Amino acid sequence: MNLTVFGVGYVGLVQAAVLAEVGHNVMCVDIDADKIDRLSNDIIQIYEPGLQNLVADNRSAGRITFTTDTEKAVAHGQVQIIAVGTPSDEDGSADIRYVLAAAESIALEMDQPKIIVSKSTVPVGTCDKLRSQITDVLNARGRGDLAFEVVSNPEFLKEGSAVADCMKPDRIILGTNSAHAEELMRELYAPFNRNHEKIIVMDVRSAEFTKYAANCMLATKISFMNEMAGLAEKLEANIEEVRKGIGSDPRIGYDFIYPGLGYGGSCFPKDVRALIKAAGNIDFHAPVLNAVEERNNHQKMVLFEKVSQHFNGDLRGRKFALWGLAFKPNTDDMREAPSRTIMESLWRAGASVSAFDPEAMPECQRIYGQRPDLLLCGTKEAALQGAEALLIATEWKSFRAPSFAMIRDILTTPVIFDGRNLYDPAVVARHGIQYYSIGRKIAK
Ligand code: NAD
């Protein structure tokens, strides 16, 4: 099948590469000429395991191409997949201007019937807006005769395992009332729907809402667990024991109940905010969603507060090592990452940071540029040099079994503030290091 994908970000590029891998003919279009230029030379601007080879292999096989030319791109695909960003607007609502712009490009250029797929996360009612916008543009062009359908097909991939998730999706949600569109979408996804039925067809609005409900449910689990961790700490219980204790109940399960520094990334924060805003717009009281967000905002400050308390509020002139910048492991994405709240709070307090992350250092450099209070180090050991304490913000595998003797010897005051509960407090204490973690007693 010939497909066009709008947007070569985390979602668009990964989906395009995976669809090409199973034999579809995919043309990717983006307004960012630099990204397209680099992709045309197999240079991938994001880190995602397995993506580099997948894109390069399919490009050399001629199944994936990159362009900024919307006319060419729209002409290419029978199916037009919109996977552009939907960031938070100033008031917290989802900003759908890029989705509308992509739909407008399609309406301006199409001269064959098309299936237009909204893969971006968009508020309920957006596909209806796209439909009327496309109708208006086609009428203005005198091409009201051209048939088209708008399908909602939200994406559920997880950054860090995006390729694997798209290769083996848990479910494929299709929001459409059109039998023709459904048939074509089933054909598109047939290679991923072989072992058992993964396609769930529903009306468009329910499909749009499913994505928000899923992300808000996951964010709720995180905020709930973080609240339990705070309570456990005060009550002198150990949240890690509690986690195992509750996870063993299959109604709760072990997934997604790790206490930490709050959710970050490009999806949960903005999607929770957008649903709160959408509820507000229709005067719907949504205390749960508001609490999820409030807890998360607080949680991002928890590590900084522990540091500040430890040093009696006197952080000026001190230097801290920070391991982990990405909002989670196996990605270089730092959008709304807890590490940013931590660094910015330390800087405001007059401290400096020497940081290491296996993948996100170029992204950190891009965000913050050169500044005297940020040193990006080539190794996790180098980040410790001259630092008074070690802070851990991301649970990269390579941080899990460090030499505690080395940490103790390099740090000027041996203390670790671990936002991801990577270590056994007793082991750290045995090495003579003071250890703060989340929801567990302080080990001295
Ligand atoms: P991204 O910011 O990484 O990429 C978006 C891309 O769209 C950029 O390259 C941008 O230049 C391009 N773009 C913007 N306007 C365009 C236009 N008119 N024509 C062509 N290209 C255009 O975004 P992302 O993380 O890939 O997210 C895309 C959507 O998918 C969002 O709605 C997001 O909420 C959703 N989503 C993201 C994830 C994730 O983990 N990142 C997971 C599921 C769903």
Image: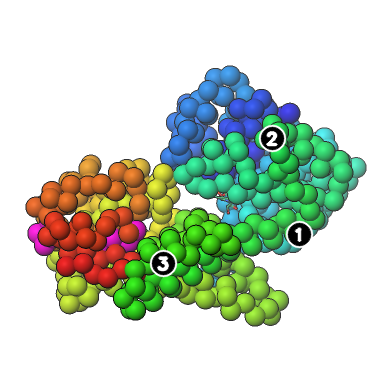
Look at the numbered disc 2 and give the secondary structure of its residue: loop
Look at the numbered disc 1 and give the secondary structure of its residue: helix
Task: Answer above or below: position of 68 versus 328.
Answer: above
Question: Which tag is nearer the camera, tag 2 or tag 3?
Answer: 3
- State the predominant SS element of the stretch in magenta: loop
The image shows residue 394 at horizontal and vertical percentages of 35, 53
Task: Answer above or below: position of 239 versus 367.
Answer: below
Which residue is under mark 2? 195
Looking at the image, which is closer to me, 365 or 390? 390
**Kind of residue indicated by mark 1:** Arg
Quote the CA–CA distance across marks 1 and 3: 38 Å
**Kind of residue indicated by mark 3:** Val
Residue 365 visible from this viewpoint: no
Residue 73 located left or right of residue 351: right
Residue 22 visible from this viewpoint: yes
Mark 1 surroundings: few (<14), some (14-19) or many (≥20) residues within 10 A: some
Which residue is under mark 1? 205
Task: Tell me which label, 1 or 2, sits earlier in the chain.
Answer: 2
Question: Which tag is nearer the camera, tag 1 or tag 2?
Answer: 2
Q: Which mark is residue 242?
A: 3
